[in-house]
Amino acid sequence: MRHKLLFTGGHHNSALAVINWLIAKDKDIKIEWVGDQYPSKGITYPEYKEVSELKIPYHKITAGKLFRFTNPFYIPRAIVSFFKIPLGFFQAFFILIFVKPDLIISFGGFIAVPIVVVGKLLGIKSVTHEQTVVIGFANRIIGKFVDKIYVSWPIDFYDADDSLKNKMVYTGLPIDLGLFKNAKKINFNNKLKTIYVTGGKKGSFILNEAILSNLEFFASNFNVIWSCGNTKGDFDFERIQSEIQKLDESLKVRISVKEYFFKEEVANVFNSCDFVISRSGAHTVYELAILKKPCILVPIPWSSNDEQRRNAKLLVRVGLGEIVEEDELLRNDFKSIVLEFSDTLEKRAQGLHADSLDVIVTQSGQDNLGNEIIKILQK
């Protein structure tokens, strides 16, 4: 019997790892996707590009979210988003009636809420996966409607009521480790250490500003592989490229910048870098843990339930990471922090609590979640 699965949610890298596993196991499985295409005018989500490249049918939805903020600047955006909420549920109904999936697989985020809730009303089974060490706001809602909540970290890490914990199954985070087995090295033709700078798929303006403000310092002391994101503004890709062109020719070649590195490229990037300067999103932190990459982590202060800081603390605890606050990035001592971190890489490797790391992360997340889905389909 041919099963049809509908994937949705905010963490497409993990979802794609599971999709590739399922397709390899069962060619008869039919997979479709629900997501957004444009976060803002003129910008396309990497999720849309990568899913479309796999020839997976992509259904666009306009879903709103509830904002929690203290800055009045966000009031207009919050109002617009609030009124999109009923539209998302309306669209979800017609998408589900059209697709008729056997199972909805959510990866959290506000996009997934209307699909899972309407799916429950229509009698469609659903499961969700949580990437962070904190159950996100969307997954707390989704968790009430799904059959299973798969989690990336050991269940006792989670602060949740019994109604959610009783649904939890520890799988780990799905990562396509096959990509890393064939990873290549990016050759800068020098003996300098290489830093990978990333603010996630959307980028981070404050990280971009911190590197750009010290561009000559970084190019003089390191090779830099830089994922700057595709958000438009004062420190976007075009501005960064323009500033790089002002450097001496000998320094320009030490900086490789792109808006976003796709999954095959990320494997090469991690294989080439000595350490990472990054936000502490769930997927990045898990990859850093599995690959045992030293990292300077800059948590988003306003992340839901302070989840980025809690992610980062896991890597600090085992000796891989160091937390730097946002306000430190634009001070002169940021350069000193980076140099000192670079100088202590060997010592950090010797002091790494590898046993503790192996307890909190698993390399079989892709297999575990894939097998869980197969079990549900076989019932």
Image: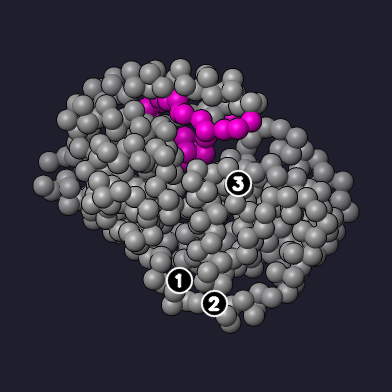
Residue type marked 1: Leu
- Sequence-wise, the earlier of marks 2 and 3 is 3
Give the percent coordinates (x, y) of residue 91.
35, 20
Report the mark closest to the observer, 2 or 3.
3
CA–CA distance between discs 2 and 3? 27 Å
Q: Secondary structure at mark 3?
A: loop
Instruction: Kindly indicate whether the residue at mark 3 contacts the one at mark 2 (C-beta within 8 angstroms).
Output: no
Residue type marked 2: Leu
Name the one closer to the observer, 145 or 207: 145
- Sequence-wise, the earlier of marks 3 and 1 is 3
Q: Identify the residue under disc 1.
A: 357
In this rendering, the answer to whether 130 lies above or below 230 is below
Q: Quadrant of the N terminus?
A: top left
Label for residue 301? 3
Magenta-tinted stretch: 43-71
- Sequence-wise, the earlier of marks 1 and 2 is 2
- Please identify the quarter of the rendering in which residue 136 is found: top left
Q: Residue at x 77, y 58 (%)?
A: 334
Label for residue 352? 2
